[in-house]
Each structure stands twice: as C-alpha cells, then as structure tokens.
Image: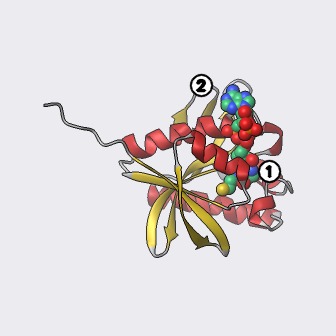
Amino acid sequence: MILETPRLHLREMTRDDLDFVATMMAHPEVSFYYERQFSRADSEAWLERQLARYAGDGHGLWLAVDRATLEPVGQVGLVMQEVEGVRHPEIGWLLHRPFWGQGYATEAAAATRDASFSRWKYDHVISLIRPINLPSQRVAIRIGMTPGRRVQFHGFDSIVFERQAAVETPAT
Ligand SMILES: CC(C)(COP(=O)(O)OP(=O)(O)OC[C@H]1O[C@@H](n2cnc3c(N)ncnc32)[C@H](O)[C@@H]1OP(=O)(O)O)[C@@H](O)C(=O)NCCC(=O)NCCS
C-alpha cells in the first residue's frame, strides 16, 4: 500500500494484475492518445517497466483500487521521465473507461502530488500531456499544475505541465 485517498488506495502492481492492465490498455478510448493498440504482450512489458521502476526509483505507476469494492479502476503514480536530457518526476494517470467522470484521477493525482513533495522530497513535478488530450489537461489544472513549454516526447508534441513544491518560509 502506497497511498490512501477518501475513495481509493494506491498500491504497487504485481504480475497478477496483468488481466486488468491488459483489458484496460486494450480499450480503444484508453489507448487513444497513445496512438497504438496495446496487445497483451505490450501490457505485460508496460507492467514489467513499472516493477523495474519500483525497484530502481522507489515509485512508478501504481494500481488505483476502489476502497469500497476492491475493484481496480486505473493506474496513477510517479514516474521518472527524461525530457530534453533531464530527468523529471512525472505524475501519470490513466483510468479504465468505466471509471471516467467520477473524479478518481484527480483524487489519486492530488495524493501523488502531495507525496512527491512530502515523501520523495522532489522540488517539482511535471506531467507531459498532448495538446489534444483535454481530459488529461483538466486533471493537471485541477491539481494545480501550470502549462508551460512544448517538447517532443515519445514522438509527440507535448505540453509540460508543472508544479513547484511550496517553499516553506522559516518562522521569524
Ligand atoms: C485522463 C483521464 C484519466 C481523465 O479522466 P476523468 O475521469 O476525466 O478525470 P477525473 O477522474 O479527475 O474526473 C473528473 C471528471 O469527473 C467529474 N466528477 C464527477 N464526480 C466527481 C467528484 N466527486 N470529484 C471530482 N470530479 C468529479 C468532473 O466534473 C470531471 O468531469 P469534466 O472534466 O467533464 O468536468 C481519462 O480520460 C483517461 O484515462 N484517458 C486515457 C489515458 C490518458 O490519456 N491518460 C493521460 C495521458 S497524459
């Protein structure tokens, strides 16, 4: 268990989560902005990348699970991404289609943002979002990120949304 929010918990995935991940990633609306179909083998590789991230970075995309039903709803987490030669902590979110429109991504992303600063001590977080991905941009704005420069990322023009950690002013 990594994080808890009012309606969700976030935990590390295991290989037993492949069925959910593969079903979700194969959904055409979920994979729409990645512009490719995800086969089961692609999802397996995706899952393995997260396991490697947990081991190497201490975090990655986690599984977001509905606390009431124990049903997985998507993946949200913190991944290191190299942008123009510099590694940045990125908050990522994707929900399975039946769970859109309920505020789950925002709820999980806000908790991840807070943990990025308090637990992992990063001084900023980013999210890389394609200009056409308006639902994802709305999540970034709702968690207090600001759109900035455009970069090429995995072959796509992407907007760098960013938020700095609050600077604590020492009491005088
Ligand atoms: C990006 C993505 C996670 C956004 O999902 P989402 O359901 O729109 O986002 P949230 O979970 O934060 O839900 C917010 C929506 O739920 C509504 N909502 C309903 N109940 C809510 C509640 N209790 N709290 C907050 N919002 C609620 C909001 O009004 C909002 O809808 P709106 O944007 O039309 O105003 C989803 O579209 C997705 O998985 N896309 C495919 C993968 C992807 O593109 N990932 C991002 C790559 S950069």
Query: Which quadrant does the N terminus fall into?
Result: top right
Report x, y in % for residue 130.
67, 62
Query: Is the residue marked by circle 2 packed among few (<14), some (14-19), or many (20+) residues within 10 Å?
Result: few
Residue at image coords 78%, 45%: 96
Query: Is the residue marked by circle 1 packed among few (<14), some (14-19), or many (20+) residues within 10 Å?
Result: many
Residue at image coords 78%, 37%: 99
Report x, y in % for residue 163.
46, 49
The image shows residue 5, relative to residue 49, as above or below, that is above
Kind of residue indicated by mark 2: Pro
Alpha-carbon span between mark 1 and mark 2: 23 Å
The image shows residue 99, relative to residue 5, as above or below, that is below
Q: Which of 145 and 37 is in front in this view?
A: 145
Query: Which quadrant does the C terminus fall into?
Result: top left
- Left or right side of 120 for 67: right
How is the structure coloured here? secondary structure
Q: Write down the residue under mark 1.
A: 24
Helix or strand or loop: what does disc 1 sit on?
Answer: helix
Labels 1 and 2 touching (C-beta < 8 A)? no
Q: Quadrant of ligand 1?
A: top right
The image quadrant that residue 142 belongs to is: top right
Residue behind label 2 places its C-beta within 8 angstroms of ligand 1: no
Q: Write down the residue under mark 2.
A: 6
Report x, y in % for residue 72.
72, 39
- Left or right side of 125 for 121: left
For residue 91, say whether it is visible: yes
Residue at image coords 51%, 70%: 83
Query: Which one is earlier in the sequence, the residue at label 1 or at label 2?
Result: 2
Kind of residue indicated by mark 1: Met
The image quadrant that residue 10 belongs to is: top right
Q: Which of 54 and 15 is in front in this view?
A: 54
